[in-house]
Image (tube, rainbow, N blue to C red):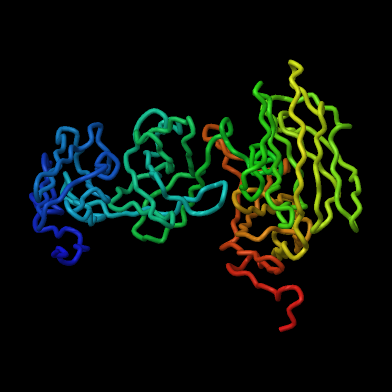
Amino acid sequence: MPTGGRTDTKPPKLLSVSPADSLKNTRLKKVELSFDEYITTSDVAREVQISPLLAIQPVTTSLNKKVTVKIADSLLEENTTYRISFGSSIKDLHEGNVFANYTFVFSTGNYFDSLQLGGRVLNAETGLPDSSGINVMLYYASESDSAVVRHKPKYIAKPSGDGTFMFKGLPKRNFKVFALKDDNTNLIYDKNGEKIAFTDQIFTPGDSQKNSLELRLFQEPDSNTTINADSLAASKAGGKGRLGRPVAATPDKEGFFYSVNADTTDQSRKSFDITQSLQLNFTRVPVLNTEKINISYDSSEITVRAAVSIVSDSVNPKNLRVTTSWKENTLYTLKLAKGFAKDSSGVDALPGKYSFRTFDEDDYGKITIQLPSKYNSQIFLLCVMAAGEVVYNKKVVSGTVQLSKLRPGKYTFRLIEDRNSNGKWDSGNLFLKLQPELVIPYSGDVNLKAGWENIVDFDKPTSKKLLERGDTR
């Protein structure tokens, strides 16, 4: 059968624009773009924007090889430069190749505003660039901060993938600057999980693109997720172990059951992390008889009963943490005798027996983190994360932090300026003029392997890997 030829990878080509681009002293009602192939438009409400914004947005339609934008010309202001940006809304019909980032400009006066204002947007919690679903918004400086919750801005710009943004064609006026992760695309800050960023000062556009305006996007505290040591325990309150393996579950017909975060499928395979607690997660808060819960281990073919500590999880009282002085590469058995747990109505949990083997020293890696002296104070917290979990979160008291018994995986690092010394990252508050606490990320990550040690110089984007333990090269 015929193949149909090569796949079209070229975007549509703009053949003409009516009326012509860059007209002065004009109040347009309609703009028509003609292309060399059949096209379609998508997500025009988000992608097609006129700046400054109008109370009624332009209506964008497509037919065959043309895109038409209709404008409510009665809303246009005198002596104002307007820019219609099409974003990624225009594509060819068959292959979806995007005619990207075209902007049409016209002026209702006899000149074009040409000033610029730029910067970048960061996720305040991670310190990393952010751009997805975000609008940077300008309001006239004469307006109060509440304008962002009352009506749409005058100008908007979308950050690129690295978080940078640039307003062009601005008048010489003073502006307040905000960034908004606008979940419902109404260009108004509705809270309800939306993220906001604001500046502490007024900005005036200039004639240079070199702008260092920085916007740190945060979610206000009523629904904010903080980074602290307790979040590790909270993340483990579900029915999976740290590696995400399925857990053993013991149900009963009454619906009172529990799960254990240990892999018991193969007693010869090392599967349990000795830096963690053994967890029993119940469907209802249990009433315990701790004498009927015990852990033993094999030592020289002798079974030894281990001393254990059993505590309820501070985040979820339905979960128990069982801790002991775990030994490496050792077969452990958890025995839950009949009557070890009841629910409030007196229903017994079924007894159980679970055997699992702990990891050996060579199953772990080490990371040494070297911090510049400017961070060597108790103002800063060092936060280390792996697989979305916090594995270390403490105040910086020296220039070197050594972490051992780390599972292989990808690790990220950040410093938190703990202004109020509460041991966690705190978000901001728009109307209290409170910026979120500063987060300084490490430029990169570390892919840690078993038996290896990595040295991280926090001021440099790469880490040094030391030889594997026992390697003499």
| Quarter of image, res 465 | bottom right
State the quadrant of the N terminus: bottom left
Q: In this view, which residue lies farthest toward the bottom?
A: 473
Q: Relative to residue 256, is residue 417 depicted above or below?
A: below
For image coordinates 78% across by 56% down, the residue present is: 397
x, y (%) of residue 380?
A: 70, 52
- Tally the marks: 0
User: Which image quadrant is residue 7 in?
Assistant: bottom left
Residue 192 lies, with reference to residue 276, above or below; the image says above
Residue 360 relative to residue 219: left or right: right
Q: Relative to 414, is 45 on the left or the right? A: left
> Who's the residue at 77% across and 23% down the image?
342
Q: Which one is in front, 381 or 276?
A: 276
* The quadrant where residue 51 appears: top left
The x and y percentages for residue 442 are 60, 60
Q: Tell me, yes or no, if residue 380 can be seen here.
A: no
Using residue 225 as the reference point, say whether residue 184 is left or right of it. left
In depth, the one of 336 and 417 nearer the eye is 336
- Please identify the residue farthest to the top as the structure is shown: 345
Q: Quadrant of the C terminus?
A: bottom right
Give how far across and how far down residue 202 sits, in percent.
45, 44
Residue at far front of view? 301
Left or right position of 214 against 246: left
The residue at 70%/63% (across/down) is 371
Q: Is residue 125 visible?
A: yes
User: In the image, residue 429 lies at what x, y percent?
Assistant: 56, 35
